[in-house]
Amino acid sequence: MVFKRRPCKAIKLNWPLYIPFNTDLWDLLNCEKPQREQIMNKASSLPFNKSTIAPLWRKLAAMIYDGLVVCAITMGYGFSVIGIKYGLLGFDLAEGEKAQLPELAILGLLASIGLFYCFFWRRAGQTVGMRAWRLRVENLSGLNLSWQQGMLRFICANLSFWLAGIGYWWQLADKSGSLHDRLSQSRVVVLPKEKK
């Protein structure tokens, strides 16, 4: 099978960063060498603007919005698991006993919340809360996160949150981002306002 080389295009995004038109790495590698070097040189020659990094208060505000969505996911998941356990499988509750999620279902709940975040970070770089506050998570090249980066970011952000928020407070000392941004090699940027 012979692959036909086609010219690459680059688009200029609203923030100061050039990326290939088609974000697929194979297409970038399939370009002619001069075109590929030209695109990559444009991207690397632009200065990194630290003012685009999202401040901590914006991240926390978006987290509150996303917390409402996570509550809805948790309730839907809980109703589903309890409905399957006691409705379809026929488990009976003793007198005065409350319905509880099985231990294995708790892992499923964490996985479903992680999939929620990873899906939206991978797809558009934004969750519902991030969209409301004009935030976008991206890797250091300005592209959407990979599934591996998304899961690593989710796990590290949870550890950061549950350890007294130490990973979030990290941003007060290091203005380039929070601890889980560094560990997952990602950043959260503020998007410019859309012109009407």
Image (cartoon, helix red, strand yellow):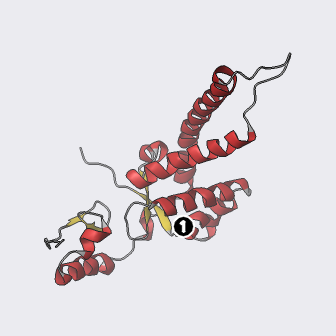
Q: Which residue is mark 1?
A: 184
Q: Position of residue 43 (x, y in %)?
A: 30, 75
- In the visual, does 30 lie left or right of 64? left
Above or below 116: residue 99: above
- Asked if residue 74 shows in the view, the reply is yes
- Front-most of 23 and 39? 23
- Front-most of 2 and 98? 2
Going by the numbered disc 1, the residue's amino acid type is: Ser
The quadrant in which residue 105 appears is top right
Q: Position of residue 126 (x, y in %)?
A: 43, 50
- In the visual, does 182 lie left or right of 121? right
Picture quarter with the N terminus: bottom left
Within-10-Å neighbours for mark 1: few <14, some 14–19, many 20+ = many
- In the visual, does 29 lie left or right of 60? left
- Front-most of 193 and 46? 46
Mark 1: secondary structure = loop
Picture quarter with the C terminus: top left
Furthest-front residue in this view = 1
Q: Position of residue 98 (x, y in %)?
A: 79, 23
Task: Determine the residue positioned at 44% across, 49% down.
Answer: 120
- Asked if residue 17 shows in the view, the reply is no
Q: Position of residue 108 (x, y in %)?
A: 63, 43
What count of labels does the image hold? Answer: 1
Above or below 164: residue 42: below
Task: Determine the residue positioned at 42% across, 63% down.
Answer: 52
